[in-house]
Image: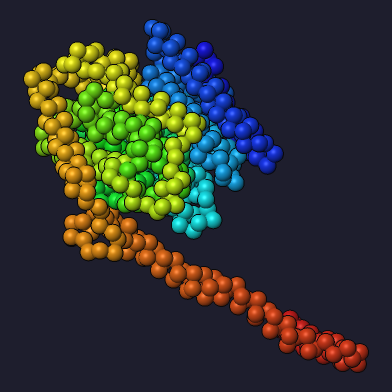
């Protein structure tokens, strides 16, 4: 079955072609079935591949498809790599993708671009699968660029709204900044190792000394690429604006798949980063800074999707923090659990927005747990999971990252716990403002409040179950588990373990203490949120009212967009204007147009000679002959 892995991306591609070409002919029911079944087929095949790989003694298979680029010594095959890392990613992309396709059938049913939307979703899944399966950096880069394109198409799906179109352009441009770093890294990889194939690059890299300059350069450039795609400081501002797209887009692209591409790429390149300690420190610091900044912004946002967007940025920061301290398994574990509970929370928010007739401001909600019981219960499960409370999935993955951070640097651990505390606060703030208290919307909205259709609630229930039990794949030994995920992923980290050796685990007493502090901090934050928004019924300050200095900083996202506008956008606009008006119009256009004007004016003067008088022409001929004779007599004699 592993040899049939090429069918996994082909099924979504077929779905894209059928729905894309027949978008004006197929019924919405047929479109949704085609789009969803294509992803379900990929999931079924991915599951078979995963089970076969798990049962096999060999844990890595390269499946060649065809020779793609061959110029001199440069040979880049188009081939797929099936190993523990890619097989799990296949399950995440196709499994979560299928649930979101089913959800979209209900959420987007009344949209005029229904078929186009499903075609875009299928195309996105196709490129994400290419990214995951590529056996070399070039095939990975094709998928990397493809998901960037699809992100642009889906974020700007309602492009007639100028703000939404601007959000799509912003995402596209900021991703291109990171992609340049990735592309330069690929060039350096080829020039250093003579190949871009993982199977050739990683064994050679393992022979280089730790701290090698070329490895530092390569990994820093790869990290720049990951910073753009996975929304880290300073390239994170596109992701909150990307909430302009339909809610299923937020769940698929900005929770479960595309934004985790950077984490996947670094986890795949683990030996390169392990041998570049400087880069690892930078990754950890940037990740932790992103986690804290995004969490501080999230605590004052009133748009339910914006809260989840900054939550995504913050959780991605934790994943990078894990990568930076060498917790590759823990970071990838958090990718898995985050895919469950964040997709659930985004789809749950979509269910709320659907019931509220596209209202997204939490100040106009309240008391919805009675009207939307399934949405409420499932979102409660997701909120508990992301807050890191046991025995939900987020507890195990976040605890593993924080334990490794404590081993690396206790100061970073303290800041990480504070970030986890902020996560619990703003997530339960969102839950309490949305579902507790009395309804604060209009009477018309209240009259039409209803639970979402089954096509939307069934995916919520499935994701809620995964959010509750998904952490069981990584139960640590201190809690009586064997961490199946760490054992399964160990072949991916073989070179890293050979270089750095096996890590010495913390003693059980320390692990229990760290868990207790983390859980206690989360419970304290939940208690503060409950007292503030349920007991005291405090409502967020409206935009027009005065805020404290710190509240203004948080609400206005630390004015980062304004700083970019002042330091980057406006100067570039001014330079562009100068080149347009002075260099282009006056210089280049002036030179070209001046040559044309000169020729035109000269021709106007010369054409006066053409009088049409034959006698004048004979006179001029004679004058010319005389002139030639005089010239020949005096100068040629």
Residue 129, given in percent of the width and then of the height, sits at 48, 29
> Is 286 or 400 nearer to us in this picture?
400
Q: Is residue 609 left or right of residue 469?
A: right
Q: Is residue 253 visible?
A: no
Q: Is residue 452 visible?
A: yes
Residue 94, given in percent of the width and then of the height, sits at 47, 26
Q: Is residue 633 left or right of residue 596?
A: right
The residue at the far right in this view is 614
Quadrant in which residue 402 is drawn: top left
Residue 83, given in percent of the width and then of the height, sits at 40, 18
> Is 622 or 519 nearer to us in this picture?
519
> Is 416 or 532 nearer to us in this picture?
532
The total number of labels drawn is 0
Q: Is residue 584 left or right of residue 195?
A: right
Identify the residue at horizontal 66%, vertical 36% (top origin).
27
Identify the residue at horizontal 25%, vertical 53% (top origin).
540
Q: Quadrant of the C terminus?
A: bottom right
Scheme of image coloration:
rainbow
Q: Is residue 21 left or right of residue 176?
A: right
Identify the residue at horizontal 28%, vertical 59% (top origin).
542
Residue 272, given in percent of the width and then of the height, sits at 30, 29
Identify the residue at horizontal 49%, vertical 73% (top origin).
581
> Is 412 or 102 nearer to us in this picture?
102
Quadrant in which residue 510 is drawn: top left
């Amino acid at each position: 079955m592993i040899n049939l892995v090429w069918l996994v991306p082909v099924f979504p591609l077929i779905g894209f072609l059928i729905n894309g070409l027949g978008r004006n002919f197929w019924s919405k029911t047929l479109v949704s079935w085609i789009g969803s079944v294509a992803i379900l087929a990929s999931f079924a095949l991915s599951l078979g591949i995963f089970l076969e790989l798990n049962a096999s003694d060999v844990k890595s298979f390269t499946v060649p498809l065809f020779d793609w680029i061959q110029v001199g010594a440069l040979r880049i095959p188009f081939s797929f790599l099936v190993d523990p890392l890619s097989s799990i990613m296949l399950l995440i992309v196709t499994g979560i993708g299928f649930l979101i396709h089913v959800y979209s059938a209900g959420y987007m049913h009344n949209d005029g671009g229904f078929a186009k939307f499903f075609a875009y979703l299928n195309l996105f899944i196709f490129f994400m699968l290419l990214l995951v399966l590529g056996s070399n950096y070039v095939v990975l880069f094709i998928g990397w660029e493809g998901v960037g394109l699809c992100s642009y198409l889906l974020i700007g799906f309602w492009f007639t709204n100028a703000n939404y179109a601007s959000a799509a352009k912003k995402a596209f441009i900021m991703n291109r900044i990171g992609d340049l770093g990735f592309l330069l890294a690929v060039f350096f990889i080829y020039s250093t190792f003579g190949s871009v194939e993982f199977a050739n690059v990683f064994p050679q890299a393992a022979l280089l000394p730790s701290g090698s300059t070329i490895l530092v350069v390569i990994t820093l450039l790869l990290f720049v690429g990951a910073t753009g795609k996975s929304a880290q400081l300073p390239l994170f501002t596109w992701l909150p604006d990307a909430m302009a797209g339909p809610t299923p887009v937020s769940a698929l692209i900005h929770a479960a798949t595309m934004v985790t591409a950077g984490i996947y790429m670094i986890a795949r390149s683990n030996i390169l980063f392990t041998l570049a300690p400087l880069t690892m420190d930078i990754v950890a610091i940037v990740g932790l800074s992103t986690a804290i900044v995004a969490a501080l912004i999230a605590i004052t946002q009133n748009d339910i999707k914006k809260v989840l967007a900054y939550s995504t940025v913050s959780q991605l920061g934790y994943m990078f923090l894990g990568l930076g301290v060498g917790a590759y398994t823990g970071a990838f574990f958090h990718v898995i659990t985050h895919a469950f509970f964040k997709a659930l929370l985004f789809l749950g928010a979509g269910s709320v927005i659907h019931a509220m007739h596209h209202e997204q401001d939490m100040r106009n909600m309240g008391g919805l747990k009675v009207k939307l019981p399934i949405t409420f219960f499932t979102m409660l499960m997701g909120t508990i999971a992301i807050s890191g409370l046991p025995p939900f999935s987020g507890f195990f993955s976040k605890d593993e990252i924080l334990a490794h951070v404590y081993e690396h640097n206790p100061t970073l651990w303290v800041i990480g716990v504070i970030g986890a505390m902020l996560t619990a606060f703003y997530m339960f703030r969102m839950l309490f403002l949305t579902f507790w208290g009395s309804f604060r919307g209009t009477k018309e909205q209240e009259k039409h409040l209803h639970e979402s259709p089954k096509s939307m609630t069934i995916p919520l229930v499935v994701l809620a179950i995964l959010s509750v039990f998904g952490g069981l794949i990584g139960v640590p030994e201190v809690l009586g588990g064997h961490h199946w995920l760490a054992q399964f992923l160990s072949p991916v980290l073989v070179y890293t373990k050979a270089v750095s050796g096996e890590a010495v685990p913390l003693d059980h007493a320390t692990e229990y203490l760290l868990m207790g502090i983390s859980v206690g901090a989360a419970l304290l934050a939940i208690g503060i949120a409950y007292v503030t928004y349920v007991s005291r019924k405090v409502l967020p300050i409206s935009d027009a009212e005065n805020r404290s200095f710190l509240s203004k900083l948080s609400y206005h996202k630390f004015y980062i967009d304004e700083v970019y506008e002042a330091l980057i956008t406006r100067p570039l606009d001014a330079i562009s204007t100068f080149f347009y008006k002075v260099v282009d119009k006056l210089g280049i256009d002036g030179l070209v147009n001046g040559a044309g004007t000169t020729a035109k004016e000269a021709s106007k003067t010369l054409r006066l000679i053409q009088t049409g008088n034959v006698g004048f022409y004979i006179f001029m001929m004679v004058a010319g002959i005389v002139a030639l004779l005089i010239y020949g007599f005096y100068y040629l004699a």
